[in-house]
Amino acid sequence: MAIVGQRRRFTLFDYVNYLFMVVLCASVLYPIMYLFFLSVSTREGLAEASSSILLWPQGFSWGAYEGFVKQSYIYTGYAYTVGRTLIGTFLSVLFMSLAGYALSKYIPFKKSITFYFILTMFFSGGLIPTYLLIKNVGLIDNPLVYILAPPFLYNTFYMLILRNFFMTIPGSLEESAKIDGANDLRLFFTIMVPLAAPAIATISLWVAVNHWNSWFDSIIYMQSPEKQVIQVHIRKLIIEQSARMMSQTVSFFDKAEAPTGESIKAAAILITMFPILCVYPFVQRYFVKGVVMGAVKG
């Protein structure tokens, strides 16, 4: 039993643990800091830098950000990315929660239905049958494909986590609510959903990150460039080294003051990743309870 006022004695394990955590944090934070230092460094500063490892900005300029945000594709790409993330996450979590809650109760053919869902985790139609399905239902070049195309609307693994979490809620609570007159919809939305908030928040973050980072479906199903998500434009700028996009970005500056291509790429990456990073602190406190309680039951 610890005595109040007595100083805790640090052991060798504590020092090693702190050192490990410092190294781990540095390995996570430095790539982000490097991108920021690179994005605000000037062309002259980078030319005079003695090392490619940046510990501070080489000069300072917001030119890379100014040139990047002036591109028209930024706003259309962001609109489709934010739209699919918000609407897609809401609908996906809603459907998975309803299915998970139903499978946590005693319903006819429960084992057969659960087996059917689990079967889809291991076997799928593949890219070509999925593309033909999307084409035959008229979703090619239709923004609804971002929400309805598999596997975004429904994920069996996430549904099973939600089902297991609902199974941890005592059945007596449900019986009490029904005795008081609550129907199934009211029972689900006013009692079960608030109690399952840790699992729902965790699953929502996973689904939102999947939507935010997704780009392959936009290339496959979307033919109009103005309907493509921001990640596709960033990929063209960074991986495909699009000379047209790069020249459009630097065209707003004089040649001597124009940011380097590497600075523009770093600014593009930071602008793209910053919104989804801001979501983590609000959901982080639900991670442990949402995942552990949803994984150990059933």
Image (spheres, rainbow, N blue to C red):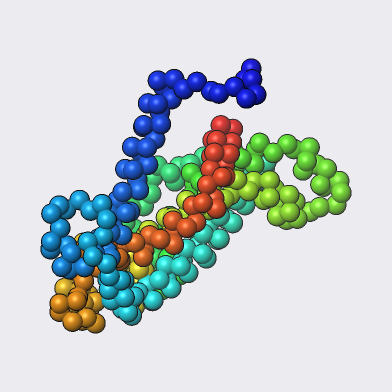
In the displayed structure image, the side of residue 253 where residue 222 appears, left or right? right
Query: Up-down: is 130 above or below 259?
Result: above
Number of numbered discs overlaid on the protein picture: 0
Q: Quadrant where the C terminus lies?
A: top right
Where does residue 231 sit, x and y in percent of width and height?
33, 64
Farthest residue in the right direction? Answer: 180
Q: At 55% from the left edge and 61% from the top edge, which residue is drawn?
A: 91
Front residue of 223 and 244: 244
Q: At 40% from the left edge and 26% from the top edge, which residue is drawn?
A: 15
Where does residue 24 sit, x and y in percent of width and height?
35, 38
In the displayed structure image, the side of residue 188 where residue 227 appears, left or right? left
Query: Up-down: is 34 above or below 14?
Result: below
Query: Up-down: is 5 above or below 199?
Result: above
Q: At 26% from the left edge and 52% from the top edge, which residue is drawn?
A: 55
Where, by quadrant of the figure, is residue 267 drawn?
bottom left
Where does residue 136 sit, x and y in percent of width and height?
39, 69
In the displayed structure image, the side of residue 184 where residue 152 appears, left or right? left
Q: At 43% from the left edge and 44% from the top edge, which residue is drawn?
A: 121
- Asked if one can make out residue 152 in the rendered structure from this viewpoint, the answer is no
